[in-house]
Image (cartoon, grey):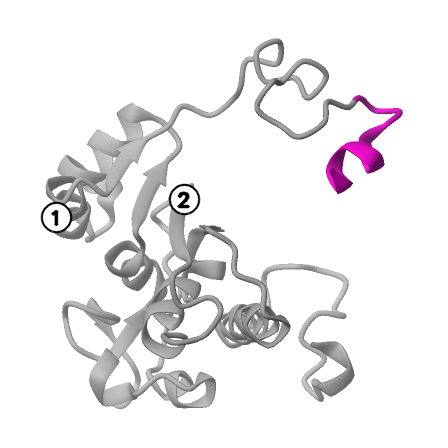
Amino acid sequence: LEPHSKENFFWRQKVYGCPDDVSRFLWFSRAALEYLAWSGKSPDVLHIHDWQTGAVAPMLKELYKGTSIGRTRACFTIHNTAFQGRESPALLDAIGLDRKHMLVPDRMQDDSHKSKDGVPDINILKAALIYADHVTTVSPKYAEEVQHTPFGEGLQRWFGKAREEGRFCGVLNGIDTEVWSPRVDRFIARTFDSETVTEGKLA
């Protein structure tokens, strides 16, 4: 991104906390998809996290049909529903999404927030929740809470819909490091440890 970004999107000595964060991460997400399509890569799944990469899900479905990533699935993991990536819909035009098509309640339109001109904001977290092939959150308990308590931050209906469609569940953080150790994992092409990680990853 940076050689062509006069906005200096990603050389700011911090990852989050800039006034143009939504714009920065929308462009990052579009650039990642463009790279995959341009290079001819076709991953089975893109695992995206929180609103910062949530726009990958709607862009993947709306803009990349017929490309090498047209059949790629999106798995969206939510860590904290309080942060949703709300912004003016004008940004959609810049990244190639049709504003009129996307700014409706069952796509990207925020359910409650409006921009200064009175037009509803976009909500990236909500859009990812609607467009992703599967949605996870950090525990089974939190998955229940975001559907039925204020932890859903206004998206309870959409979490419930995803659950009804069989697309939403909670996965407890953490792994069993003995079972899933790359030293003994029989499901990978080549086992490896800290000394042979490069060779293992290349396999």
Q: Nearer the viewer, residue 31 or 141?
A: 31
Report which quarter residue 90 is drawn in: bottom left
**188 displayed left or right of 157:** right
**Amino acid type of the residue tagged 1 in the rendering:** Lys
Query: Residue visible at 38% across and 83% down?
Result: 92
Query: Residue visible at 21% across and 70% down?
Result: 107
Q: Residue 84 in the image: state x and y as whole percent.
A: 36, 58
**6 displayed left or right of 50:** right
Residue 194 circle label: none
Residue 97, compared with residue 19, is above or below; it is: below
Q: CA distance from mark 2 to mark 1?
A: 16 Å
Label 2: which secondary element: strand
**Highlighted magenta segment, given as a residue range:** 193-203
Residue 159 lies in the magenta-colored region: no
Q: Nearer the viewer, residue 76 or 11?
A: 76
Label 1: which secondary element: helix
Report which quarter residue 125 is drawn in: bottom left
Q: Residue 200 in the image: state x and y as whole percent.
A: 77, 32
Residue 196 lies in the magenta-colored region: yes
Residue 149, compared with residue 141, is above or below; it is: below
Task: Name the image quarter holding the C terminus.
Answer: top right
How many marks are shown on the rendered structure?
A: 2
Residue to which mark 2 is pinned: 77
- How many neighbours does mark 2 have within 10 angstroms: few (below 14), some (14-19), or many (20 or more)? many
Residue to which mark 1 is pinned: 161
Query: Residue visible at 28% across and 60% down?
Result: 131
- Mark 2 or mark 1: name the one nearer the start of the chain: 2
Q: Residue 44 in the image: state x and y as whole percent.
A: 46, 51
Confirm whether residue 170 shows in the render: yes
**57 displayed left or right of 169:** right
Residue at the extreme top of the image, as rendered:
178
